[in-house]
Image: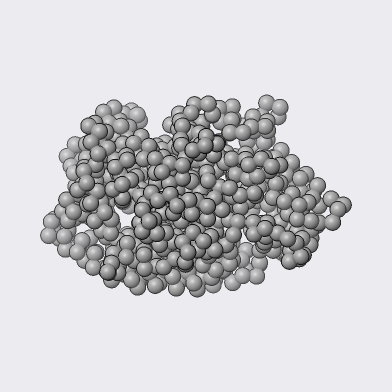
Amino acid sequence: MINNPLLKEFDTPPFQSIKEEHYKTAIKEAIQLAKEEIEAIVNNSAAPTFENTTVALDYTGEKLSRITAIFFNLNSAETNEEIQTIAKEISPWLSEFKNDMILNADLFKRVKTVYDQKDALTLTPEQDMLLEKQYKGFARNGANLDDDKKATLRKLDAELAKLSLQFGEHVLADTNAYELLITNEDDLKGLPDSTKEAAKLLAQQKDKEGWLFTLDYPSYIPFMTYADNRELRKELAIAMGKKGFQKNDNNNEQIVLDIVTLRHQRAQLLGYESHAQFVLEERMAETPKQVLTFLNNLLTKAKPAAEREFKNLENYAKKLDNIEQLQKWDGAYYSEKLKKELFDLDQELLKPYFKLENVIYGVFEVANRLFDLQFQEIDTIDKYHEDVKTYEVTNSNGDFISYFYADFHPRPGKRNGAWMTSYKSQQVKDGVNERPQVSIVCNFTKPTETKPSLLTFNEVTTLFHEFGHALHGMLANTTYSSLSGTSVSWDFVELPSQVLENWCYEKEALELFAKHYETGEIIPMEYVQKIKESATFHEGMQTLRQLSFGLLDMSWHSEANPEKITSVKEFELKAFENTRLYPDVAENCMSTAFSHIFQGGYSAGYYSYKWAEVLDADAFEYFQQEGIFNKETATKFKDHVLSKGGTEKPMELYKRFRGQEPKPEALLKRAGLINNN
């Protein structure tokens, strides 16, 4: 224990010293320490006050939070069998600890005593929010239940924690298990040289002859977009779509049914009709009915456009290659060809202008111009993999703002996708403003022997998106860590990330970083114009796709009798009825690999991407009116949104920045779904 780096005092995570065997001991010890901190609050002989109860409780479990932040990010970004085994063991411990705290009657009594007298206390809006959230955290999670029901809740939570982990492991295992090895060069027709080179390198790394393709996005997406061989596109698409849906040890069908049933039982135990009702009570949207109204209103606007676009795409594929029935594995391929024809825009032409290092510089420069931030790459703090880049972030006065970690390339132990996480939250404690440690994780094409890492335009927007989340974490300036940074309503959390994507389409921003990696030439303005013109290409179909995911999520979590569902696939087909364009693929299922809602935190919350798009379109319209690098507008966004975290209701913060509630017209205009005039 003495030599356990996780139990020593540390500022940044001591990655280089941590071994797998350190985790369980450290987490056990940190849980014990947190329990002692809670006992000290409960046994305090003084009457409950805001300071000795509310604030004291917010400070508990800091050591545990720091250790688990390290562990669970590595379980996503750099995992192995040992880490996955540990995750299964510790998840029930953490679930039990959380329940021990929430269901501690004496602790809740003190919290409730302070809460009941809150009108007589002179609290700041932030203090008021802390007290409100803390009380609801207990009341909404079983503190008012009798002992038998509390015991049932503990069982449900432990089982849900276990199932969620298994779900993620199965998806990762199926992802890693599939490989498409091509030995005939004719089968590579249509693929860009960079994709072929990356595939050859991947094959060599695995001691294979030929070109290797996997289900990792930098390998999968170019193949689906450019490969002329329709049969191989079909094979790859079906492999991607049947993750968690095969007759093997990684099948997730029963796990999906169990998770939705247990979530429903949990919600009902707590007095809610459904898991969706429980979740949404604390979101901007407030009720399942409001979410469904929101999604269906957008569906009404998007569906005619989507059907028109799909019909055009079908006609185009038929004219080009005599394709009688457009299938899912044809969508990206013919869309790219049609886009190129309509806008004379080839993604491969753009890539040389988006060298990863230049895009990183670009996003840093945008942050500098908007929020006066400087980023200095450093090698003085530990990293968990050699690919990770580490930075010190300061402001124009030289004040330390944050540490920033960035991990950009796929690896076998890393799950697909992109995300932001935090190793240490910002807070003010004992008069010291403790600054945060923020990380983003992505999966971008690796450099090859002849080319640096060149990003597609989609990858550029992904980097800006995750960096928007990172700014929310870095610029946090609140008193309490539980209200800091991205600790906001789930349907508000995507605003900073999605709004930053808008700068990728602006000439003024692109000129800063979109430079040809060989010649240094700035991206031609005709390309910028084409990027803007093509931004709404197939927007109806894209919107329909996002809405289908949101509606599927709401179907699973608003279902009155989930225990009666016998087929995941049939249930899913019914949920997709109003949004389906392509024929169904019998071997495929979305739900069994829908990690956002069955492994991540988006259950009954996937709609929030579209919800936040309304906010981001409205917010960016304001930036455009004032100038995209206007300091005054940027400062208002920082002061009222980025720095405030969850200290006040999101709509109040938004209105303070914008001067009004968001209008959905800005989104519909930007998406080309209503006339711009």
Q: Nearer the viewer, residue 388 or 17?
A: 388
Q: Is residue 667 visible?
A: yes
Q: Residue at x 39, y 40 (%)?
A: 365
Q: Residue at x 28, y 48 (%)?
A: 507
Q: Residue at x 64, y 32 (%)?
A: 10
Image quarter in which the N terminus is found: top right
The part of the image, by quadrant, that contains residue 260 is bottom right
Specify whether 583 is left or right of 565: left
Q: Which residue extends farthest right?
A: 45
140 shown above or below 407: below
Q: Is residue 467 visible?
A: no
Q: Nearer the viewer, residue 18 or 286?
A: 286
Rendered location of residue 514, percent (x, y): 29, 40
Q: Residue at x 23, y 68 (%)?
A: 308
Image quarter in which the C terminus is found: bottom left
346 shown above or below 602: above
543 shown above or below 10: below
Rendered location of residue 156, percent (x, y): 64, 58
Rendered location of residue 477, percent (x, y): 58, 47
305 shown above or below 432: below
Q: Nearer the viewer, residue 496 or 632?
A: 632
Specify whether 172 is left or right of 322: right
Number of numbered discs present?
Answer: 0
Rendered location of residue 670, percent (x, y): 32, 62
